[in-house]
Amino acid sequence: MPGIARYSVSAMTTAPKSSVPRTYQVRTYGCQMNVHDSERISGLLEAAGYTPADGSADPDVVIFNTCAVRENADNRLYGNLGHLRPTKLRRPDMQIAVGGCLAQKDRGEIVRKAPWVDVVFGTHNIGSLPVLLERARHNAAAEVEILESLEVFPSTLPARRESTYAGWVSISVGCNNTCTFCIVPSLRGKEKDRRPGDVLAEVRALVAEGVLEVTLLGQNVNSYGVEFGDRLAFGKLLRACGDVDGLERVRFTSPHPKDFTDDVIAAMAETPNVCHSLHMPLQSGSDDVLKAMRRSYRAERYLGIIDKVRAAMPDAAITTDIIVGFPGETDADFERTLDVVRAARFSSAFTFQYSKRPGTPAATMDGQLPKQVVQERYERLIACVEEITWAENRKLVGETVEVLVAVGEGRKDQATGRMSGRARDGRLVHFDTGGLAGRIRPGDVVHTTVTYAAPHHLNADGAPLSHRRTRAGDAFEAGRTPRTPGVLLGLPTVGAPPAAPVPASACDR
């Protein structure tokens, strides 16, 4: 295995030794935390002199930012690395880097399986990537650097944001839970919390760039404050976001039911810019399975939280994650999950077949279920969820919704003449532009009336009732995306900061 070393943060500004900027492409797999990490990777590379590949030619550097939660993550990575091998043979100066959770897990095994990979870096040392790329070029050998603990919080690094209107803001990294199916804590480490002032500084920086919506991110977002001893810190942070001028929408993902407190519900209900949407993983409706998963709540507690949320916010849309086929799950256990789904009335659910992950306690449990049993239950769950989500969406036909116009949400928009965006409750809305075609931009806000509901989206086929042009829409039209510098945190950095910083998503929980 290549040497494991540590480098100072100041090394991240080392530029490639070339008069022509090298191009890069980041390919992201996994949760919102991975997506946000990729924004940091892009910001780092551009600070080091790289430029984004425009798609017309093969990039000089391809970075895979990986997930390790699902079993097919390994197959997907190594399959994609195999597809790049002919290009690497044809262009030896091209570089391939692998980072993220799978890199943290597999380490030097990646280079053994795919010796054409140039760099492997872990979840704790994103900031080392530019210098590792340069060392690999100089030494003509693979560089592997995997740190065991976080030395530099990712938000100290510059970011190239992907959206003009919505931004991810990480409030913590790592997780203190020990769910038996999840490999994330061993790859991301123990929870590290940012100070509230640092979080709000990043939020304000995004809003100053025109961003209208932020999503607060954490592996277990509502345990925020555990590191500095304030169990009410998350609710306070939500309320503080309400005081940020120009911030129109606040979301967060993903909370853990065991840490969900009444003060958070009150903050959601009483802070006007906090959206009435909640993504809260269930995983199973069976108390026996929840116990085997080491999920420290039970179905009654979970449904009790939902009851309180809906009492405070009757319009709240609640989404979830559910795993089918956990080791030892019986037919009766599965039926209890369906019962909870019917009682919770989710507006959407991310459903997964249990995936055995080496290194997790569940991987060696008795009662591993046959594939055909898991598949049959999964199909029944999908049918149950879609029946409910369709019924819940139909309740909105005839209602007026506020839509933040997005890009890339509607695959059929060009053919249907519609645009798409998200309502305040997070639902996807495809809307007719009426006489405003060509004037509505991603980042603008429209009000429109729902005319049709499907299980996973709403249609609004009448002309918009109103259209508001925004600074986010102006930025999109001008081709500008926010670029935020690193935001200082309550954690020490390593080495000297860059002389001239560049100016301005979770996994199964």
Image: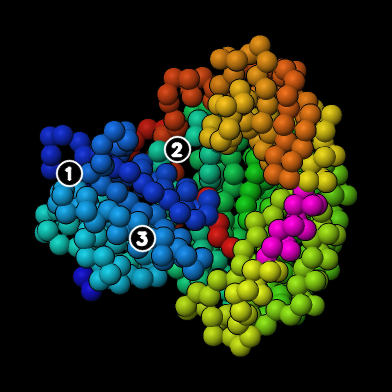
Residue position for label 1: 16
Instruction: Give the mark nearer the N terminus: 2 vs 1.
Output: 1
What's under tag 2, amino acid-wise? Arg
- Range shown magenta: 378-389
Instruction: Give the mark nearer the N terminus: 1 vs 3.
Output: 1
For the residue pair 151 and 364, the one nearer the viewer reads as 364
Would you call the spot at circle 3 few (<14 residues within 10 Å), some (14-19), or many (20 or more)? few
Please give the name of the residue rendered at 71% of the width and 50% of the height, measured from the top-left corner.
348
Placement of the C terminus among the 4 image quadrants: bottom right
Is label 1 or label 3 in front? 3
Q: Is residue 373 visible?
A: yes
Residue position for label 2: 161
- Measured in 3D between alpha carbons, the distance from the residue under mark 2 to the one under mark 1, in whole angstroms, is 22 Å
Q: Residue 486 placed where, x, y %?
A: 40, 43
Find out whether the residues at labels 3 and 2 contact each other: C-beta distance under 8 Å. no
Would you call the spot at circle 2 few (<14 residues within 10 Å), some (14-19), or many (20 or more)? many
